[in-house]
Image (cartoon, rainbow, N blue to C red):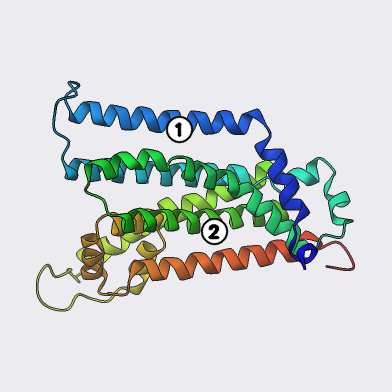
Amino acid sequence: MQQRFSNPVLMKELKLRFRTLKSFSGLMFYLFLLFIFVGGFLSVFTQFTGTGFFRPNESFIMFAVISILQMALVMFITPGLTAGAISSEREKQTLNILLTTTQSSTQIIIGKLLSSIAFLILLLIAGLPLYSVVFLFGGVSPVQLTTIFLFYLLTIVAIGSIGIMFSTITKRTIVSMIATYGGMIFLGAVTAFLFFVGISFETFGGMPIPTSGGTPPSSPVTYFWAAINPGALMLTILYPESGTQLANMTGISFPVWITYLIFYFAITVVCLMIAIRKLRANMKHNR
């Protein structure tokens, strides 16, 4: 039973990744940047005297900025860690050797994915002590912090799955990385642009959005672009009233986080299935 659920690919990748000086130097640099930001934020709001007041609402602002900063880092770093998982093996001519082992395609893909995102999860966990400063001054509930980190985890897995898929179906790492970053630009920037285009079309196209009273016009497409945007979900988590405003603008009161969860879970499953099927596409017998 233990051998059935063991994953030698995952264990090997974890050892290779976490035994290098580059991983720990990157972790140190990341924490150093967060420390500078938190220290600078406290210094500015206490007027560099150490005797000023730091109110709970200011503490919440720091929490929101740190959360958005970490989300940006997640979307920027994840493609670089996952886009070369399979294509780099192909470029080093070691993929055929890996495919001749007893490991199934599922074990190889899952092992590569988990080992790639493990470093990102370590970054998030290592930054938790800095969040203790926020709880020291108040303004943030533990539920918000837990929700934010669950949001990070789902987004990391989904983006990592996209990177693994492109790494499997392309032959060059640079092509896979460009395609993965293109997907991130679409999810982060293009969806926001399409949302504002939809809102502008409804506003200036003869269908004004009511500000008070009445039933707003239903716009499922505009709602969908906002619901799958990581930034929009981050805002609804940090500022729940923004979810009400979005419902008033689109006419759809369905919770954004449920749509986000369904969409990114579907992306993860579809991308992993494509990667597993395409890993041995040129072999007669698929595992």
Q: Is residue 78 above or below residue 278?
A: above
> Which amino acid is tagged 1?
Leu
Is residue 74 shown left or right of residue 53? right
Q: Choose top left, top right, bottom left or bottom right for residue 41.
A: top left
Question: Would you name the residue on which mark 1 appears?
Answer: 31
Residue 60 visible from this viewpoint = yes
- Disc 1 element: helix
Task: Name the residue at 35% across, 42% down.
Answer: 131
Which disc, if any, is residue 158? 2
Could you tell me which residue is drawn at 47 percent across and 33 percent down? 30
Q: Is residue 136 above or below residue 42?
A: below
Is 29 left or right of 129, judged from the image as shown? right
Real-space Cα separation, disc 2 to disc 1, in angstroms: 24 Å
Label 2 Cα crowd, 10 Å radius (few <14 / some 14-19 / many 20+) = many
Q: Earlier in the sequence, mark 2 or mark 1?
A: 1
Image quadrant holding the N terminus, namely: bottom right
The location of residue 209, given as percent across then percent down, is: 18, 68
The residue located at (67%, 32%) in the rendering is 20
Which element type, helix, strand or loop, lies under badge 2?
helix
**Which quadrant of the structure image shows residue 13?**
top right
Q: Amino acid at mark 2?
A: Ala
Instruction: Estimate the x, y position of residue 187 in percent, counting from the top left.
Output: 46, 56
